[in-house]
Amino acid sequence: MIYRRRRTALTGIAGATVLIGLLASVCQMKRTPESGPATSQESDYVTAIHDVLSIDGELGMQRNRATETESIVSSIRAYVAGIDGTDFSGCPEDFTEAFRWHRDAWEKSIAFFERFPSLRGEMHDVFEAIRSEGGETQTELERVEALIWDSWAEVEAVAADYGAIEPSR
């Protein structure tokens, strides 16, 4: 009998906790692409985010191809400089912060990639050449890649929160 009462009380507390969590989530929800922008500010954010993602798409293609003729470090520095020259003034602060994290992840990768000044090829091929060395080199590359991909996932998540892109699955 005592066990049953405690279980009921726990269920009640757990139920209340779940309800509070759901209410908090609903109150913090941002608009989805289906509901459309509620204000011109949100519409301006979507436009600014699209503009930045478009610029990044171009910078990324240039970065990935530049390694065919120059060092990976040089191509990363050019990419970072391109991001630094991008206008984020129309973007929401959380998107700008996420993108800054992504930019910083690329910049931090330079220290690792300086060890491979003569590797050439499309960037993904260069990554695979480094990965093929195995051992600690492969492990370090995976850490670098994880930071870059994690930061990019955050950029996409924030962009999706504003309805600028479809959420990743």
Image (tube, rainbow, N blue to C red):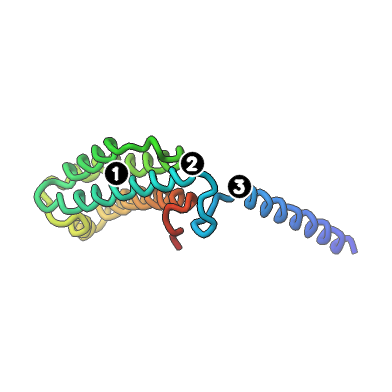
Q: Earlier in the sequence, mark 1 or mark 3?
A: 3
Q: Kindly identify the residue that appears in the image at 23 percent across and 43 percent down.
A: 79
The answer to whether residue 111 is seen in the rendering is: no
9 over 39 or under it: above or below: below
Q: Earlier in the sequence, mark 2 or mark 3?
A: 3
Report helix, strand or loop for mark 1: helix
Using a 10 Å C-alpha cutoff, classify the residue at mark 3 as few (fewer than 14 neighbours), some (14 to 19) or many (20 or more): few
79 over 120 or under it: above or below: above
Contact check, label 1 and label 3, Cβ < 8 Å: no
Q: Which residue is mark 1?
A: 106
Using a 10 Å C-alpha cutoff, classify the residue at mark 2 as few (fewer than 14 neighbours), some (14 to 19) or many (20 or more): few
Q: Which mark is residue 41?
A: 2
Q: Which mark is residue 134?
A: none
List the single residue furthest toward the right.
1
Report helix, strand or loop for mark 3: helix
User: Front-most of 35 and 8?
Assistant: 35
Q: Which residue is mark 3?
A: 28
Q: Earlier in the sequence, mark 2 or mark 1?
A: 2
Residue 130 lies in quadrant: bottom left
Quarter placement of the N terminus: bottom right
Report helix, strand or loop for mark 2: helix
Disc 2 from disc 1: Cα separation: 30 Å
Q: Position of residue 157 (x, y in %)?
A: 45, 52
Task: Determine whether, in the image, residue 83 is placed left or right of residue 14.
Answer: left
Using a 10 Å C-alpha cutoff, classify the residue at mark 1 as few (fewer than 14 neighbours), some (14 to 19) or many (20 or more): many
Three-letter residue code for mark 1: Trp
